[in-house]
Structures are given as C-alpha cells and as structure tokens.
Image (cartoon, coloured by chain):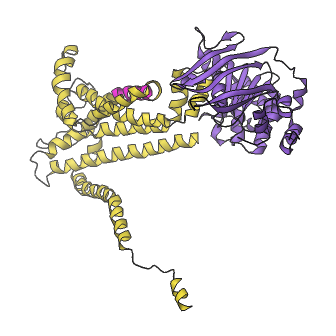
Chain colours: A purple, B yellow
Amino acid sequence: MNQPNEITMHLDHSLSARGASIPPETSDPVFTLDNVSVLYGDYSAIRNVTLPIGRNEITAFIGPSGCGKSTLLRSFNRMNDLIPGAHLTGTVAYHGTDIYGPNVDPIEVRRKVGMVFQKPNVFPKSIYENVAYGPKVNGAKGNLDDLVEECLSRAALWNEVKDDLKKSAYALSGGQQQRLVIARCIAVKPEVILMDEPCASLDPLATAKIEDLMVELASDYTIIIVTHNMQQAARVSDRTAFFTAELDDNGIRHGRLVEFGRTRELFSSPTDPRTEDYISGRFG
Amino acid sequence: MSETAEGLSLRQSRPRYGEKIIRSILALAAFVSIFTTFGIVVSLLIPSIEFFLEVPITDFLFGTVWTPLFKNGEFGVIPLLSGTIVITLIAIAVAIPLGLGASIYLSEYASDRVRKVLKPTLEVLAGIPTVVFGFFALEFLTQAILIKIFPEIEVFNALSAGLIMGVMIIPTIASLSEDAMAAVPSGLRDGAYALGSSKRQTAMKVVMPAALSGIVAAFVLGISRAIGETMIVTIAAGLQPQLSFNPLMGMQTMTSYIAAAGSGDLATGSIEYKSIFAVGMLLFLLTFIMNIFSIRLVRRFRQAYQ
C-alpha cells in the first residue's frame, strides 16, 4: 500500500531545485500566524491556523476548493476588510506587529504586502500608467520612467512592451497582462507578494513564464501563492501548507490546516494520510 | 416500406401563422418610433422652408432681436438661443457635480442598506411633474430665497429656472452614472486597494475612469433634457426674449417660445405661426448634433479601454 504511485513519482521529478537549500524550520519569519480564524458573519471559512512565513521563500497554499486558502491569503494584506461581515480572530504578526492591532492602517499594510489576483486585473489605462499607478497614489512625484522600466524588466515584460508603453494594457495577452500586474505590484516596493492562483486563467506557456518569474523574484521578495495546481506548488515553492475542508460537530464546513513543511518532504513523505491522499490524486 | 418513407418527411407539417403575426407586431413596435421621428422632421421641414422663404436664414441665425408678434416683427433667434444656453449652463452646473457626487457616494461609499433606500428615493425626483418644479421655482425659490439674496432679481428669472432644472436632472445623471460605476468589475477595485489606494483614490482614479463612457453618456442625456425642458422655463423664466447673460433677468428659451406661441391664437399659415416650426427645427438639429456627438464620444472612450 505504501508503494509510491505514478503521480507522486512524477511530482518528485518536478520538485524545485531550490528546495534543497531550505532549512527544516523557518528561522526568520516575515509573518507569523497564531491561531488565526476568519469568519464571515457567524460562519468561519478557516479555523485555527498557526503558521510561519519565511523571508525570501515561496510558500504555497494547496488544498481542495472551499478549504479557505484564498480567504487566508487575503488576511495577510487585510483584503478581507473589504468584505462586509468578515472578521478575523487570532494574530497575524508582521515582523512582530499584529496587522489587525490598533493603530494599524490597512493601507500601509497593503503597501508592504502586494497582491496578484486570479484574473489579470489591469486597469483600463496605458501600460505605463498601470505601473506608475501605485507609486503615484503613494505620493511619488516627478519622472517615473526609470521606475516603470525597472519594474517591467523585473517582470520580464520590458522587451515585449517597451515600444508600446502608451498603448492600452487591454491590448496585451492574458499572460502579458498578468506580468504587467506583477510589475505594477512591485512598483510599490512591497516586501511580500501574495498570489491568488495567478496562473488559473493562463495557458501552459504563459504559466511557465510566470513560474520562472516567481522563482526569480523570490531572491528579493517573500511570496505566498495559492494554487490548485499541485505540480506548480511542487515546481516553485519552498514550503507548502496543505489545507482541507472539514465538517465540524454541527455539520458546518470549514477549512483546516492539515500539514505544513518543506515542499520536498511534504510531497515525497507526507505525514498525514489526508495529505497523501490529496497529492496522489485520490480525492479533492 | 412506403409508410416509413412517408413518416420521414421533413417538410413543415402545418402552417405557423402565429409566428408571422407576432413577428409583424413586434416589427411594427420597433418601427413606430422611427416613423414618428421621420414624420416630425417632415412636418417641421415644410413650414420651416416656407418660413425661410420669407425671412432670410442669416437674419434668423444671426439676428439679435426676436419680436415675432409685433407688426413688422424681427426674427433673430439669438435671444432665444442665449436664453436656452444660459439656463442650460446653470442647470448642468448644479446637476453634474451633485449628480456625479451622489453616484460616487452610492456606488463606492454607501452601505447596501443605505443604497437600497437612497437610490429609489432619488429616482422619485425624476417622477415629479415638471410643472410642479416650475411653480416651486417661481413661488418658493424666487420669492422666498433668491429675492433676499439678490433684491434686484426679476420675478421671472433664468436663475431660479436653471437651478430647479438642475435639481430635476440630478437623478438622471446620478442613476446612470451609478449604473456605469457599479458595472466596473470588482477585480479592478481589489487591484487598486491592494496597491495601497484609499477609498477616494480607488473611486477617482480607477472606478471613475473605467466608467467614463457611461458617465459621459449620462451627462449628455442630462444636457439634452435641459435643452429640451419646457415647463419649468415657461413658468419660472418668463416669456421675454432678451439677449442677456444676466441670470437675474427673465429670459425666453426656444422651448418656451414654442410652448407660448403654440398655445396662443396665431393664424395658421402666418409668418408667426411658421416661426414656431423654424425654432423647432433648430432645436431638433441642436439635440440631434448633441446625440451624434455623445455617441462618438462614448465610442471613443470605449475603444481606448478595450
């Protein structure tokens, strides 16, 4: 029964080379979640998560639909504040400061913690204006040409768009739009980038480009990615958190963190049978 | 064998008359408005041509005195045009900022509960008969308020008519702009907030530009309503055609001339009678040009953003 099946073997091959150098324990966490639950009204989407996020690491959140992984991701930059009735208990500490504590401005949090969404949500503006938007609303003055070029280069998009900076961002392909969103995000100079299924609407080639970019960006940024694609988690991430949806005693569905560890270990020798079932494709 | 061959017939088994009748009725419904517009143009055109055979078109377009009911009256339309423009400008100066402000509040700031009460309440304003607005302008606004601020104001004046007309147009602009902003995908708002935008920055720099074509269309519709509005100006702005840009004076607009002259006892076929159609033609052309212009504008913004 414990023979490695085809899928896990295949995943094993695609495990990122980065994985080898990752220490077993997170030593220098950027974020520390302590007993975090997110509630919508009385209904809790995810319960009792305790988890560190390592600096300059890529942490992947995987799990079946409805396990609360996207909800949890949105609590790192207080995006859940925008949903009426959403409420968080526990602490989300960013370098030791609870971002839900008093005297914390969510706008300041979002400047430090950027986000890339499932659907490329470029603004109906020019390519240039999309990248310059963040710095402008954050008070940047003067010429932003150098910054725009730097961010577009960093997002591996500059060579494709350098002659069309004044063109509408809607003229770009989906993959290019998603890289533009990444450029727009890093223009604000965040420390952390949250990615909510960033490749869900992209073709395999565009996905490969975004994955390469993620690994490249991890040298300067801390990245948390939610993905449905387990191979993607295996390919790009250093650590993986596996979530699942459970029913409580009252029959209410909610998300739980099942297992968290180095991606290599979690995929090759998961400790929890639910993790093993999920990554070997037996459920979910 | 022959039975199965007959059973396989794919010809229409019975005539479907109902389909044709419904189709004709629906097409008729669609064409009624087109025929009506066409009919209006024709009925305006013939008396207008007769009018311009007697009054040179340059005298009409550039003349500054409008005294059609006098003996040897003059037919310079400029005073009516200036009256229309002054009152329309006052109205949009009220309606655009307030209407746009209301729409931003409703779409970006108000909670669901507030919006559900406020939007229908605002739309009730659009249902008040314009004759009520007109008397409100004359009896309340002018007599109780404006006369205290501007003692020299005339009883019939452009200011009260313009202000109240602006109030009348607010719901049109607010409601249509709100629809346009509500249609902006929430992903764009999320993107803006995630970059550290405040609510104001999100509304002004992302949502409003994204909804611009709809907002411009709302403005143009509001302006068209102001140009075409008749009852408020007839009641509150007076019936004196004068070339002036002083809003404290009475003014006559193109529409109020048509209403006043049309309801009088002018002899059919007289030059005064025909002048109604000439003014109507001009009014029709103005709103027609406005509509063409707005369609162009909306299309241009759309192209830029898609």
Write the residue at 16% across / 50% down.
Answer: B273
Q: Is residue A188 left or right of residue A222?
A: left
Tell whether position B10 is magenta. Answer: no
| Image coordinates for residue A283, horizontal then vertical, percent | 72, 41
| Image coordinates for residue A25, horizontal then vertical, percent | 83, 18
Write the residue at 35% across / 29% down.
Answer: B117
Can residue A68 be seen in this snapshot?
Answer: yes
- The span shown in magenta is B93-106
Write the residue at 37% across / 66% down.
Answer: B23
Q: Is residue A58 left or right of residue B156?
A: right
Tell whether position B98 is magenta. Answer: yes
| Image coordinates for residue A162, horizontal then vertical, percent | 74, 35
Q: Is residue B188 above or below residue A24?
A: below
| Image coordinates for residue A278, horizontal then vertical, percent | 75, 38
Q: Is residue B237 above or below residue A75?
A: below
Q: Is residue B286 left or right of residue A253?
A: left
Can residue B155 be seen in this snapshot?
Answer: no
Q: Quadrant of the C terminus of chain A?
A: top right
Out of A62 and B193, give the one closest to the viewer: A62
Out of A51 and A194, give the one closest to the viewer: A51
Q: Main secondary structure of the magenta part?
A: helix
Q: Is residue A178 left or right of residue A39?
A: right
